Amino acid sequence: MAGVELDELTRYYKRGNEVIRALDGVTVTIKPGEFVAVVGRSGSGKTTMLDLIGLLLRPTGGKLVIDGVDTGKLSDSERAHMRAITVGFVFQEYNLLPTLNVVENVMMPLRYVRGHKDGSTRAHDLLDKVGLSDRLKHRPSELSGGQQQRVAIARSMINRPSIILLDEPTGAVDTETADQLVGLLKQINREDGVTIVVVSHDLDLAAQAGRRIRLKDGKVIADEAGVVSGASV
Amino acid sequence: MEVFRNITRRKLRSSLTILGIVIGVLALTTMGSMAENFNALLDGGVKYFGSSIQVGPPDGQLAPLIPISKINDIKQVPGVEAAFAGYGFLAKPGQVSIINFGPPDEVIATDPAENSWGNLRLSVALGHYLTSTPGEVVLGSSIDQEFNKKIGDTIDLPVRPADAKPDFVNHTYTVVGILDKTRTAPDGFAYINLLDGQTLLKDSLPVAIRDSVDVSQITQNIDVYGKPGTSLSDLDKLADLINQQVGGVKATRPSVFVNGFKQGGALFTAITEAAALLALVIGGLSVVNTMFMSVAERVREIGLKKAVGATTMNVMSEFLIEATVIGVIGGVIGWGLGALITIAGNAATPPGQPTLFLLDVNITVLAIGFATVLGAVAGILPAWRAARLDPVAALRNE
């Protein structure tokens, strides 16, 4: 299982002459199999941290190690390969491809990985796990928001990643569906041992994570385990 | 499959884009076939005139006649291997043809032995080639088609015009052979014996001098051959040598004819294919536009693909394949429609008239290949833009 180490990780942006410190020297270690919620106000650096861990962004400074690999030394194609096999993504807006049906959407990441086997079987198993085995040939437009997010979760697991990164996964669904999705994530975390890092404003979701990392102005201001209720994020 | 689904995602836009390519390829196919047909016609001229030396009367002589004894003089010139007399007459005198895509139909009187010289060899589809027997005719494919003759039938040549004067003379010949199609001048020719040619020559002379001329001693032109395989430049030198050593005749350098044919062919090809390529390039620009629109609409999709492991090359190749498929679809449809037009156009050509189109493998490969390459090239810039998108910005694109 993967471990993630952020060592004085920084990411700065330039906006005109102004330097925006989106992430400002964050040092965090996420152990394999943890369920971590990253919380904070808008602009606190949550999404930047997720994008850095997901290798979508290169840090301005510091070090990011995933599965013992110093990602700063990887080429663009090596980073793409690591994104394909080590990391799974789930987004608030699902980002399913409208021209593909459910099974095809789940299998889509396989096309960027060589030598995969039994992709179809794996996709069917995952869709069964997320409760969508009766929607295999449906197009995304024929599914509810919660169902689309389940497809996105199944897609994130197709390459058996060690980390799943979720960006506001319950932001576009109702409360009941959000609860179901959280339950599904906990099940995946528990049964498959996958490390889950979720960025969310959803207090209920954050409360059910095993660990909460609170960010403010790009810095970690709290890193706490256990149940949090009524916390202002 | 996903490529086709993406193309059909915006049906009207994709259809219009493909239509642009279709029009371009249609133009390329039809105009290219026309140029190919014309070039085949000229190629026959290059083969014939590029392997023989045409000897006629000297400049300034009004009557196109030369003593047949000049053949022996010419044969004395070093390098000359063979020389043949020849006569040519309009097969359909009095016919007015404002637009004719090819040489006029002619009755050619020739020595049967000449067919074994030169690069343009005539082969017989039915019957046999000319012999020394008078009264026989071998018909080219289109003139045979026009008069619908079979072996053993007779034909009156030259063909009597509808408004012929009472003293118009022609003769009846028996069809002994029908030539294979050459796509060039011989298709419209009727070949007769030299003796019969001399008879026609006599008929063509003014009545006042007709009986005082011994036509067996004159010819209209002499075809001269060097050793088989003699180069064009050596034939030019041989023509110069004939002019130096034989008086009362003029040998024309073969390169004069060959260059004329080639220039004519190149000009025609350039005009027709440039017009068609212009249409195709305009179609290509519509592919560029469509692919840019497609990239703009699918920014989040591109971001997602990068997030799940697609490399820059993966994304680029996906869009390139899509643009290429648009080119292929447009190319195949355009070629198909062009082929139908060329087939219908040729079928509608009156019997005996040269057809207008020659749709061959060259044009097929050019049309579909160019459309495919055009699609791919047109897709490069949009695909590059897609591949270079920042995945973070792309994923959160509204």
Image (tube, helix red, strand yellow):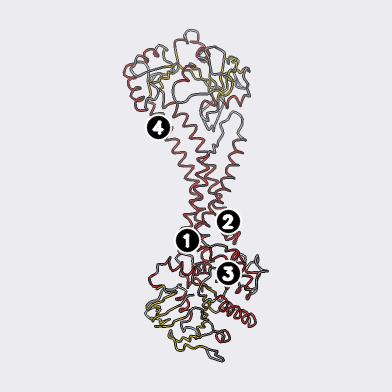
Check whether the beta carbons of the residues at disc 3 and disc 1 lie within 8 A of each other: no
* Mark 1 vs 2: CB contact within 8 A: no
> Which residue in the protein does label 3 denote?
A96
- The disc, 4 or 1, on the residue closer to the chain's N-terminal end is 4
Q: Chain of mark 4?
A: B
Distance (Cα) linking label 3 and label 1: 20 Å
Q: Position of residue B397 (x, y in %)?
A: 51, 72
- Residue A7: percent from left, percent from top: 39, 80
Q: Nearer the viewer, residue A29 or B175?
A: A29
In percent of the image, x 58 and y 27: which residue is there? Answer: B142
The Cα atoms of the two marked residues, 3 and 2, are separated by 27 Å
Q: Which residue in the structure is indicated by mark 2?
A: B16
Task: Name the residue beneath numbered marker 1.
Answer: B316
The dot on residue B259 is 4
Cα gap from disc 1 to disc 2, whole angstroms: 23 Å
Q: Hey, what amino acid is under mark 1? A: Met
Q: Is residue A28 visible?
A: yes
Residue type, numbered disc 4: Asn
